[in-house]
């Protein structure tokens, strides 16, 4: 009787065992063509498939987008960018910008202009402005001379009429000499070199200007102009204040001691009225 017609044994399970399933699957038989897979089936299967680490929407904050290397802007290009932006403001140009920049009391603006106080930045800026203003050079020169005069006036005042409030009270007092207080020792201790050192300490700007005025050509470098600078400074101080007369008193006594005619002494005096 064929196997499949035999009655089932009460102890035999209707399910195939694992060994029987393997035997049946390995038994030779006709080759069947694979069943075509539908698109719905693939969609369901791939939808259930978990995404990989590169497919998930993860945080990419550390990702750096590659940039195209560009050459840095020059200072002229940066300046042009600022000027182009300035055009967007109504009734506001370069002159207004510079005036507000250097006169404003705004603390934020002062943080920017404070850079001028570092090193020689202010001097470099003034030199650039002076070299640029060729069409108004005479006005610039006049402004420089006026401000230089104010600086020199303050320095000279510390040795003359404003000596009490200046930093050179001792030097100012020594330059004021009464003829009755002159002694032989004072005359013997007089030195033009020492007096020039006092002038260089108390009025360095005036000495620098006088030296620039007396710049000599190469053919006259053998002449010593230091004594002339000292005499000129003493003359200016005495013209500023008649009480500042140390050099004049010493010269007058030396002339008197050497029997210089009185009329010649008066010619060297600056205290006489015309």
Image (tube, helix red, strand yellow):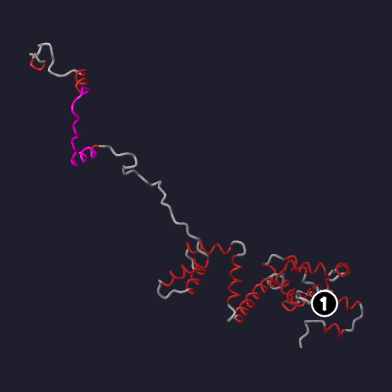
Q: Is residue 3 magenta?
A: no
Relative height, residue 138 to residue 189 (above, below): below
Magenta extent: 25-47
Residue at x 66% of width, y 76% of height: 149
Q: In this rendering, would 224 be left or right of 20?
A: right
Which residue is the site of mark 1?
220
Q: Residue 2 in the image: x percent, y percent? A: 10, 15
> Who is closer to the viewer here, 130 or 263?
130
Looking at the rendering, which quadrant does residue 174 occupy?
A: bottom right
Q: Which quarter of the rendering shows the N terminus?
A: top left
> Who is closer to the viewer here, 162 or 155?
155
Looking at the rendering, which quadrant does residue 151 occupy?
A: bottom right
Q: Answer few, some or many: residues within 10 Å of disc 1's Cα (few below 14, many 20 plus, some between 14 and 19).
A: few
Q: Secondary structure at mark 1?
A: helix
> Who is closer to the viewer here, 136 or 113?
136
Q: Which quarter of the rendering shows the C terminus?
A: bottom right
Q: Residue 238 in the image: x percent, y percent? A: 75, 77
Q: In this rendering, would 187 be left or right of 137?
A: right
> Who is closer to the viewer here, 151 or 264?
151
Looking at the rendering, which quadrant does residue 160 occupy?
A: bottom right
Tag count in the figure?
1
Q: In this rendering, would 148 be left or right of 252?
A: left
Residue at x 31% of width, y 44% of height: 57
Q: Is residue 35 magenta?
A: yes
């Amino acid at each position: 009787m064929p196997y499949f017609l035999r009655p089932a044994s009460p102890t035999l399970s209707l399910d195939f065992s694992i060994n029987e399933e393997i035997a049946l699957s390995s038994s030779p038989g006709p080759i069947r063509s694979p069943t075509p897979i539908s698109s719905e089936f693939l969609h369901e299967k791939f939808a259930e498939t978990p995404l990989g680490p590169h497919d998930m929407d993860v945080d990419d904050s550390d990702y750096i987008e590659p940039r195209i290397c560009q050459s840095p802007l020059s200072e002229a290009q940066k300046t042009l960018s600022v000027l182009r932006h300035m055009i967007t403001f109504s009734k506001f140009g370069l002159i207004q910008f510079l005036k507000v920049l250097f006169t404003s009391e705004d603390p934020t603006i002062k943080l920017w202009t404070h850079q001028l106080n570092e090193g020689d930045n202010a001097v470099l800026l003034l030199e650039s402005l002076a070299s640029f203003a060729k069409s108004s050079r005479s006005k610039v020169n006049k402004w420089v001379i006026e401000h230089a005069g104010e600086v020199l006036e303050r320095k000279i005042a510390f040795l003359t009429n404003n000596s009490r409030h200046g930093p050179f009270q001792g030097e100012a007092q020594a330059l004021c000499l009464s003829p009755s207080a002159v002694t032989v020792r004072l005359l013997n201790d007089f030195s033009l070199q020492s007096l020039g050192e006092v002038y260089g300490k108390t009025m360095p700007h005036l000495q620098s200007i006088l030296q620039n005025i007396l710049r000599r050509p190469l053919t006259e470098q053998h002449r010593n102009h230091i004594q002339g600078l000292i005499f000129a400074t003493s003359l200016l101080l005495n013209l500023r204040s008649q009480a500042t007369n140390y050099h004049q008193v010493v010269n007058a006594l030396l002339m008197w001691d050497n029997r210089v005619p009185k009329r010649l002494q008066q010619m060297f005096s600056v205290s006489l009225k015309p």
